[in-house]
Image (cartoon, rainbow, N blue to C red):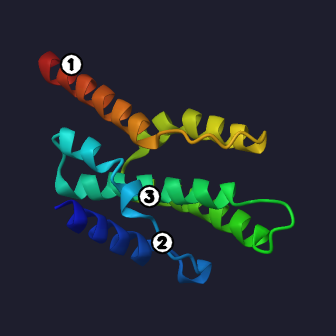
Amino acid sequence: MNNQLAQETFRLLQADMSPIAGIQLHLSPVECEQLLPVLERHDLEYSRKVHLLGIYIILTLAAKRHMECVPHHPDLTRNILDGDYLYSFYLQFAVKTRELDLVAYLAPSIKKMQIRRANGNFAEENLAVIMEEFLVREQRQQGRTSKAI
């Protein structure tokens, strides 16, 4: 199922991305596998799993492209533009899939990561952990809402 989920997510993302951007989505299975156990631990519809994995993939690739921005690198401009496009694509995709609460939750973490990278600190933040924290918080809030009804 995880392989099917990843393949379906990549197809959806590639179909939604602008062909003019010329960005090919390449992410190793190991990188995808960080979020897959998180998705399995939560009772989510299959389509939502696809959406969350898509957001994870886009953000991971955007960060990778920006981390490849080294002075005098022949692809410096391309890496900057690809990373910027992927961050805007993330927002488009999140709006399309109605994951605005996730965007609001991730915003401070993403901004902190970007600031750290701009200051030369390229330590990886575990996005899968942050997304799981969001899902746990969301479940708690839904539990409170259903008890109040």
Q: Which residue is tagged 1?
A: 144
Mark 2 closeness class: few <14, some 14–19, many ≥20 residues within 10 Å: some
Q: Tell me which residue sits at (43%, 75%) in the image.
A: 14
Which of the 4 image quadrants contains residue 101?
A: top left
Q: Tell me which residue sits at (49%, 38%) in the image.
A: 106
The secondary structure type at the circle numbered 2 is: loop
Query: Is residue 97 at least partly visible in the picture?
Result: no
Q: What percent of the width, then of the height, locates residue 97?
A: 35, 56
The amino acid type, in three-letter code, at marker 1 is Arg
Mark pair 1, 3: CA separation: 31 Å
Between marks 1 and 3 in the image, the one whose residue lies nearer the viewer: 3
The secondary structure type at the circle numbered 3 is: helix
The amino acid type, in three-letter code, at marker 3 is Ile
Mark 3 and 2 residues: CB-CB less than 8 Å, in contact? yes
Which of the 4 image quadrants contains residue 71?
A: bottom right
Nearer-N-terminus badge (3/2):
2
Q: Tell me which residue sits at (28%, 42%) in the image.
A: 38
Q: Which residue lies furthest to the right in this view?
A: 72
Q: Which residue is tagged 2?
A: 25
Vertical arrangement, residue 65 with respect to residue 19, above or below = above
Vertical arrangement, residue 50 with respect to residue 120, above or below = below
Q: Which of 47 and 9 is in front in this view?
A: 9
